[in-house]
Amino acid sequence: MNKSMGIFEKENHINFFLLAGSKSNLATLDFSHLNIRILALNSDEFDSILKDSSFEEDWYPRNRELLFADIKKDLIEDYMIESLYVLMPIDLSVIVETKYYYECWTILLIMFPSVLSIYADFMYQIFDNRYLWQIGSTQYRFYQKNQFEDYLHFEESNITSINKFIVLYFSRISNLKYVKSAIDSYKLSFHSNLYSMSYISLCICLETLVEGSIELSYRIKRTVAVLCSKNENIGLIIFKNIDNIYKLRSKIVHGAEVNSNKIDEYRPYLRMIVSKIIVELIIHNISTLIDLNYKITSIGFGDRQKLSTAYSSLVLSTIMDEVIDTKKLSAIK
C-alpha cells in the first residue's frame, strides 16, 4: 500500500456485492431508500466510479484488475459477463450493512424466480469517505444451469410497479411475521440440489398460510386460489393445480414412487405461485395470519381485492401472471 495513505484522516470498510444471472437491466431498479444502487459491472458509470474513487493513478488499474481477475477465470460464457451487476452504496460515506444487500437479492428472487445469485463479495478500505482500496473478495458458487431462459427477466413496461413494490416490501415486511416464515422456506427452495426437496420447501411456504390441521389440504387450495385469482375461472384452474401439487407432495413425503417428470412440470409453476402469494400478501398488508384466514373465509375466487381496503394490483411480471392464469397442470395418475 502506498505510503501516502498515511495522510488520510478517516478509514473505514465497505462491501460491493456482485449479482449474476440476469438478462434484464437491474440498473433500472430503485433501492435508493437503502442508499443502494445497482450498476452493470461493465458499464461506463461503474468504471467512472472506480476512477473517481482512486486517490492515485495506479489505484484505478489495480482495483479494476483485482475485480475482474477471479471473475474471468470462472465465467466461461461471454453472455455471463453481461449479466453481472454490482450492488453498492450510492453515498460511499454512508456504510450499508451487508444484510440489506442480501435483502435486495431476496426481493429480486421473490418478484422474479430465477437463477439470480450472489456471485461475489468485494471488500474495500475507504479513506476520507471517497477513496477505495480493494483488500479482498469472497467468491460464491453460482448455481446456474447453463440455460439462459432461467435467468432473471422482467418487462420494462412494469418497472414503475416493480419499484413501487420494492418500497412496499421494505416498509412492511418486518411487521408481517407469517409472511417472513413463508419467505424463509421460499429461499430454501433455491439452495437444494434435489428438486424433490426444493418442491417440499415450496409446499411448506403454502402451509405457513393456514392455521391448524383441520381440512388443511382444502384450506390451502382455497387460500391460494383466492389470493392469486382475478376471476372465478382462474380461481378454479389454480384450485385444481394446487390439488395436483399436493397429491405429488404426498407421494414424495410418504416414499411412494414418483415420476421425476412430474416434479419438473410442477415445480416452476409452484414457485411462481409462491412468488405471487408473497407479493399479494405484502400488498394487502394484513397484520396477522388469524386475520388473513378470517378474511379468506368470507370471499370467493376473483375477490382478492376485498381482502384489504387499500388494495392495488401491481403487475411485476406479465409473463408469470399469464402462466398462473392459464396453465393447467396434467393430473397425477
Image: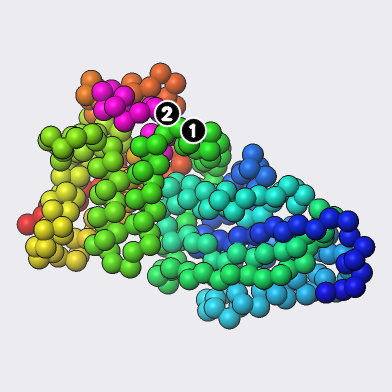
Residue 144, how many percent across, how many down? Answer: 43, 68
Q: Is residue 247 left or right of residue 9?
A: left
**Quarter of the rendering occupied by the N terminus:** bottom right
Q: Residue at x 26, y 57 (%)?
A: 199
Residue 6, how many percent across, how many down? Answer: 90, 66
Q: Which residue is mark 1?
A: 172
Residue occupying the far left of the picture: 333
Q: Is residue 106 left or right of residue 43?
A: left
Q: Which residue is mark 2?
A: 285
Type of amino acid under label 1: Arg
Q: Residue at x 81, y 53 (%)?
A: 129
Q: Is residue 3 magenta?
A: no
Query: In the rendered view, would you say 203 is above or below 125?
Result: above
Is residue 314 visible to the viewer in this orientation of the structure?
A: no
Q: Is residue 267 left or right of residue 175?
A: left
Type of amino acid under label 2: Asn
Query: What separation in Å lies between label 1 and label 2 (alpha carbons)?
Result: 7 Å
Residue 65, how many percent across, how many down? Answer: 72, 76
Q: Give the extent of the magenta segment.
A: 279-295
Q: Is residue 26 left or right of residue 145?
A: right
Q: Do labels 1 and 2 touch, CB within 8 Å?
A: yes
